[in-house]
Image: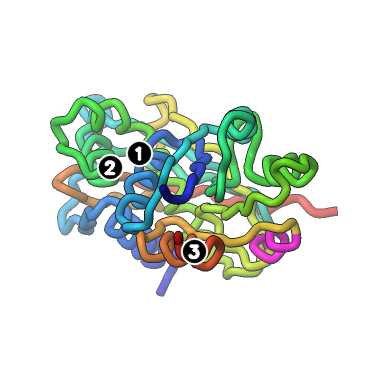
Amino acid sequence: MDLREQTIQVIARILGETAYIFVEIPDENPIPDPDKWDAAGVSLRFYGSENGEMRMWASRGFARCVAANMLGIDEEDETAQEKGLDALKESLNIILGNYITTIYGVEPVFDLGLPEPLDPAALHTDLVRSDAILLTAEDYPVLFVTDHVAAKTG
Amino acid sequence: MGYTVMVVDDSDTIRSVLVRTLGLTKLPFSEILTASNGVEALEKMKEHWVDLVFSDLHMPEMGGIELIRRMRELPSYNEIPVVIVSTEGSTTRIDNLKEMGVKGYIRKPFTPEGIRNMILSILGTWE
């Protein structure tokens, strides 16, 4: 299984276990128009034998759905709206933590930063990345991009 | 009557999810306190007796490791068991935490069964 498949598997498992959301890989090429997509983005850095950052972009409707499912409340509940971004941050946190042990194994120590909201302008760059992972979940597009940088030694 | 538990996590969502999960364990709780970082947790401990702390590792202001260090320095708190609830899965990290006196480690995503078993293994059945 290559890195892309492993990453998709981790994303699907975590969104399923934490928010009861099923993830699909779209057959067609439905790259959203960045100027029309109401996406919120979050990023999280990791530091260890390699450093890097994972970024997640998702519609605000998807964020609301994740928050509602995690909290066991109705999607129309105001709290689901309020906690959407926080739910996205926490989803990314759990995805990245599990991604790291999937890719690097359970022995190395990696430190994770704190999830941060992304500048919407960064979406344009991430959408055209050839290694971007675009998935569909609850009929919403969800985008993941991961950067790896070799850590400096000595 | 029941256990008094404190949940320390900077994510509002995870605090709510963990409080909800504690309810699903069907264990008796007299109080479930919450704090968004180590500083807030220590402040609340001044006013409340706590049987067990569930803490995240990475939080602004004061994270889980610093919280454990501070608790171990204070005679009133050094016996309170701490369980780390984190997304990280490094066995080396978990071993290091156990050397610091952490009583247990639960990896996110967690389940009511995992939380229940952890509480029972540390505090025993409420009588």
Task: Decide if residue B122 is on the left or right side of residue B30.
Answer: right
Question: What colour-coding does the image apply?
Answer: rainbow
The extreme bottom residue here reads: A1
Please rate how many residues cluster around mark 3, counting C-alpha atoms within 10 Å: few if below 14, some from 14 to 19, many from 20.
some
Of the two numbered discs 1 and 2 in the rendering, the one whose residue sits closer to the viewer: 2
Of the two numbered discs 1 and 3 in the rendering, the one whose residue sits closer to the viewer: 3
Q: Chain of mark 3?
A: B
> Helix, strand or loop at disc 3?
helix
Q: Chain of mark 2?
A: A
Q: Which residues are magenta?
A: B93-99
Residue A88 visible within the image: no
Is residue A130 shown in magenta? no
Amino acid type assigned to the residue bearing label 3 in the image: Met
Dots 1, 2 in contact, CB < 8 A:
yes
Q: Which residue is mark 2?
A: A71
| Identity of the residue drawn at 43% across and 50% down | B2
| Identity of the residue drawn at 16% across and 48% down | A138
Disc number at residue B118? 3
Spot occupied by residue A90 in the image (x, y as percentages of width and height): 42, 43
Which of the two residues, B71 or B93, is positioned nearer the viewer here? B71
Q: Which residue is mark 1?
A: A87
Please rate how many residues cluster around mark 2, counting C-alpha atoms within 10 Å: few if below 14, some from 14 to 19, many from 20.
many
| Identity of the residue drawn at 40% across and 58% down | B110
Spot occupied by residue B12 in the image (x, y as percentages of width and height): 41, 34
Which of the two residues, B124 or A89, is positioned nearer the viewer here? B124
> Helix, strand or loop at disc 2?
helix
Dominant secondary structure of the residues highlighted in magenta in the image:
helix
